[in-house]
Amino acid sequence: MTPLAGYLLVAALLFSIGLAGALTRRNAILVLIGIELMLNAANLNLIAFWRYGPHPEALTGMMFAIFSIAVAAAEAAVGLGLVIQIHRHAHTTDLDQMNRMKG
Amino acid sequence: MQETISFAPQLAASPIAGILWLIPALPIVAAGLSALLNQAKRRTSATLAIGSMSFSLLLSLVAFGHVLAGWAHGAAGRETVNFTWIQVGAANVDLGWVLDPLAAVMLVMVSFVGLLIFIYSIGYMKHDENFTRFFCFLSLFAGAMLGVVIANSLLLLFMCWEIVGLTSYLLIGFWYQKPAAAAAAKKAFLTTRVGDVFFLLGIVWLFSQTGTLLFYNNGAGSIEHGALAGLLAQPAALGLTAAGAIGLLIFAGAAGKSGQFPLHVWLPDAMEGPTPVSALIHAATMVAAGVYLVARVYPLMQAGMQPGGTTTALTVVTWVGAFTAVFAALIAVAQNDIKRILAYSTVSQLGYMMAGLGMGGVAVGMFHLITHGFFKALLFLGAGSVIHGCHEEQDIRKMGGLKSDMPFTFLTYAIGMLALCGFPLLFSGFWSKDGILEAAQHWSVAKTPFYMLLFGALLTAFYMTRQVAYVFFGHWKGGKPAHESPRMMTVPLAILAFFAMALGAIGTPAWPWFRAFLDSRAANFDLHGFMEPGLLALMGTSTVVVFLGLGIAWKLYGDKSPRPEEPDALEQAAPAMWAALRDKLYVDEFYGWTVIAFYGWWARVSDWLDRRVWGGVVGGVAGLFGLWAQLNRFLDNNVVDGVFDKGCEELDVGGGLLSRVQTGRVQTYLRLLALAVVALVAILIWSSRT
């Protein structure tokens, strides 16, 4: 097994845990945490592909990952803000009750 | 025509001629104002009407005085004020008014008689609930009539003429609840319309030939020398010149308005209107409008006349007039309605006027018009007073002995009756009728009209005596006793009675002032006027004729006072003739069998054509479209709608299915998304394996 495959395996595992959390958790904050996990799995992939790719001397993968983390931070802030607003509005963070967009 | 563009009066016009338009305008404005009043404002509307009429009379007198002064200085002229009304391309339609002796005399007569009748109407219409409307119509009539008098344009005259016809219609049908009045109004309107169509044709023809409808316009008018020369050179059909043909067309209009045979049928029926209306419109003024019209276009009528000769147009006027005079007098003999007798008498006298115009010229006809205007208004108002006094009874057989109950009415009525009969020397009718007879005697074409008119005079004396004998002599046969009318009604009678006698003075052979005035010649008092050859003999003859008529009638009817159901004295003598005369010589029946039957037949034919022929065609087309529509409906229902409905159903089902996915739960969506990604990845892997 090459080191890359190992990283990818860890990243895939991390993504699956995140996805499972996002799909199964009822609490909006835990769903948000699941999403953050999936994001970080993607970051791990980016770093691994950069480090074991054809041009490890250029810092492109690192830059990508840093950008992605910055965006994820902003996204987490927006997401948390939305969750707080929803909680204020509906007095719950249970996603099963958030079904007003039902067609 | 160029110098009279815009509303500026001609330089020659005097101040009074400049404001002549006020004379008709005042009553018309009064009519407009009282049309706005409500029913309760009786006093206001009467004041408006009488006030405006008084001002018109005042202005008329000033105008008359102005013409008179000019005439006394030997400069009686004709003043016209013309202006362009419409300009179409190169053609102008001009209107204007004229002040000349003819108009001045007529103005005074119309406004004076009109004012008296207005005053009388206050008394007569006192109890009528539509008092305000009555005075509104009456003022409108007076204004339009005065407009006819001063018009210097055939078009303006025609417009006023039609308003006069309209008000006549409105006033005959004033008591429209009475079916007879409504029918009479319609009859009057339609019958005069027959004449007016010819009149309008004449106007159009005249305009096309001369390019102007002004009568007088400094030599460029349509009945002045230049235009007449052109009209004479233009031949029309049947050996007539254009001048003659147009003259005859205009005369047809005049005949309709003036009740000349064969268009006289409306006038007796018009007596269904209130009596003041009969007096003003259907005796003194409106019916005289036709005579006035002929007098106004007299230059056209006599165009091309050789000295001592005559023209075709004037010959026709004479014959129609003379025939009408005798014809209507005959019918008047056998009528029993007090107003109908007077109506036929009016028709007959209008015939005299027409004959006078045809044979003797403007002055002869106009003099009879003026005197007749006064004494016939007097007779009608007298008749109104009698009817009022006898509690709305109009049948002379049910009256009698009124000379003691209504002495004042009797006195004035007798004066009017003697004036109408032409009782010698004292009464105006004698002089004016003698003028016509004298002209007839010297007529170059035939002597027959003279004898006809003489016979007419005999009949006139006869039927008037019969009427007076029935009404005023004998004994009272009605129920409630008769009473004398109020002062408001008798004072106008007295004034009219005075003029019925006095007016004769201005037209005697010794002092033919009226004729001289109209002809703008000097009038001299000269007793030798009586010494003209044949004149004294003629006066003697007509006196004998009048006394003969009076005598025969008095012998037949006298002081006998037969009972209402008893046959008339004349009926006993000649029953067949009496029946014919009583039934108005069957003219109405004749029209019923011919004109009206024809229209009825034509209406039925049209109805049949409409129903069967045109209706069939339209129905067929409609049926075709109906079939086409049925086909379309079938296609729509079964083909177009079927396809459409099917499509809608499918969409509905699909939408239902899809909407189930929309649970509203974010995590469901996310799950679907994850599944989709997995599927996508699977596809990518599977497809990249090759």
Image (cartoon, rainbow, N blue to C red):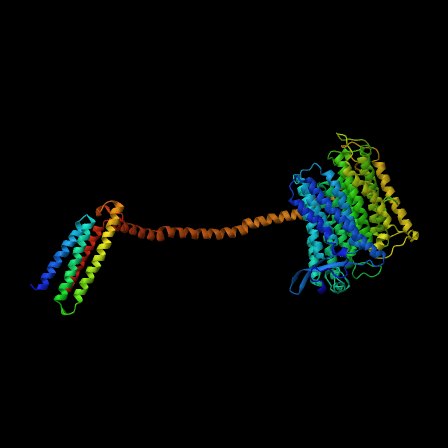
Residue A94 in sight in this render: yes
- Relative height, residue B531 to residue A62 (above, below): above
The image quarter containing residue B80 is: bottom right
Q: How many marks?
A: 0
A90 or B534, nearer to the observer: A90
Left or right: B571, with A76 as reference point: right
Which image quadrant: the N terminus of chain A?
Answer: bottom left
A82 or B389, nearer to the observer: A82
**Residue B263 placement (x, y as % from top left):** 72, 49
Residue at 43% in and 53% down: B628
**Residue B485 placement (x, y as % from top left):** 77, 35
- Relative height, residue B171 to residue B400 (above, below): below
Residue B326 in sight in this render: no
**Residue B347 placement (x, y as % from top left):** 76, 46
A67 or A19, nearer to the observer: A67
Residue that extends furthest to the left in the rendered view of this protein? A1
Left or right: B610, with B56 as reference point: left
**Residue B196 placement (x, y as % from top left):** 69, 53
